[in-house]
Image (cartoon, grey):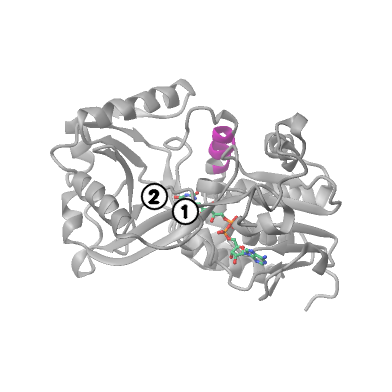
Amino acid sequence: MLSRPDVAVVGAGPVGLAIAWRCAARGLRVAVHDPAPGSGASHVAAGMLAPVAEAYFGERELTGLLTGSAARWPAFAAELTEVSGVDVGYRTEGTLMVGLTADDLAEARRLWAYQQGLGLSVTPLRPSALRDREPALAPRVRGGALAATDHQVDPRRLVRALRTAAERAGATLVPAAVRALSELDAGVTVVAAGCGAAALTGLPVRPVKGQLLRLRAPGGAAPGFRHVIRGYADGEHVYLVPRPDGEVVVGATVEERGDTDVTAGAVLRLLRAGVGLLPELAEYDLVETLAGLRPGTPDNAPILGPLPGRPGVLAATGHHRHGIVLTPVTADLIADLVETGTADPLLAPFSPARFASPAAGGPGPFVSEEEYPWN
Ligand SMILES: Cc1cc2nc3c(=O)[nH]c(=O)nc-3n(C[C@H](O)[C@H](O)[C@H](O)COP(=O)(O)OP(=O)(O)OC[C@H]3O[C@@H](n4cnc5c(N)ncnc54)[C@H](O)[C@@H]3O)c2cc1C
């Protein structure tokens, strides 16, 4: 074990491990604390790198961070694969966004128009062009659009690769939970504990439940489609993420609750929507049903930077639906901040300080146990 590390990272999910890797690669002595690395939201996550499809109304600054991080992904994936020897499953076939019924298409088209207005790459496709790209789509699918720059990675492989890369760069893993930041003695402490950050810091990070299924194509075959497919199907939102080994991820619910129970109703809705878009899925094996907790924040954006009133403590949490796509930019900017003590201007909109004072629109000195009982 290290004597006194330069950096203590709390949490060995993708965010904490990537920060640890980047810091250790700069010659800093790093300890990463986690009783169960990779067991948080990333164990459940689909791995879509979808800054375009997930550019929603009212989230312009977040969309900027997402597109900036997605642009770092090709080099990040290549470097990580080389350093770790682990193939992270980075795939660049792009994403098809589709609407099953006329109503579904109307809803989707409004969002596509917004995304195009931001200058993002969204190309509308007629049903015939959709089926040229993915013949397995249901004949009922009314229309769609291509987000050619939205890609995917396998989050479980990503965590494995990051852990190997961090350890090879010299980071030490401490297999224990941190109950209070005062337990740690390090030059800088980075809280990258996902939903666990709330209890350690009082930051308004809340669990947002997502249920998700994993299917497998029969007979060890690859899935019968190549793009990530995100659809509106009879009013349900669903995504289908194909992996070369035959796995298809079908996700996900978005529920304001903090348990990880899997419910029959959610499985039914996800399967009905998924099979509605891609009928052959009914023939696939259902191999896993699970639920994870996204680290949500009041404005859906991550919390990145120095914690007010806590010298030497940085937050890197609250990545909500986007922790996988945001891993490269978070790691680079937090490692810069650790090394130089100066925050990149890109971090400004995501500072923890935005929740620190009522004047700044925040709820006060972060939040109380009563307001956020999951703390
Ligand atoms: C259903 C679902 C689908 C998703 N799909 C996508 C997607 O397609 N694309 C995308 O970009 N994102 C997706 N996400 C979101 C993504 O998984 C998260 O944003 C991401 O995992 C956050 O990474 P993290 O490292 O901050 O937290 P986590 O992955 O939650 O990891 C946190 C780690 O901290 C540890 N920890 C917690 N408390 C403590 C403590 N006190 N001491 C020590 N260690 C502690 C935990 O054990 C865990 O290992 C999805 C999430 C869910 C639930």
Residue appearing at x 73%, y 43% in the figure: 352
Q: For disc 2, does the CB lie below 8 Å from ligand 1? A: yes
SS for dot 1: strand
Q: Which stretch is magenta?
A: 62-69
Q: Residue at x 56, y 59 (%)?
A: 80
* Mark 2, residue position: 253
| Outermost residue to the left | 139
Rounded to the nearest angstrom, the CA distance separating label 1 from label 2 is 7 Å
User: Where in the figure is residue 218, as x and y percent of width and height?
Assistant: 19, 66
Look at the numbered disc 1 and say if its residue's Cβ is closer than 8 Å to ligand 1. yes
Of the numbered discs 1 and 2, the one sitting upstream in the chain is 1
Note whether 87 is above or below 351 in the view shown.
below
| Residue furthest front in the image | 370
Q: Quadrant of residue 231?
A: top left
Residue 23: image location, x then y, percent: 73, 58
Dot 1 and dot 2 residues touching (CB under 8 Å): yes
Q: Which residue in the protein does label 1 denote?
A: 209
User: Which labelled disc corresponds to residue 122?
Assistant: none
Examine the rendering and report whether any part of residue 46 can be seen.
no
- In the image, 315 versus 97, the foreground residue is 315
Tell me the amino acid under the disc marked 2. Thr
The quarter of the image holding the N terminus is bottom right
Q: Which residue is located at x 81 percent, y 69 percent?
A: 183
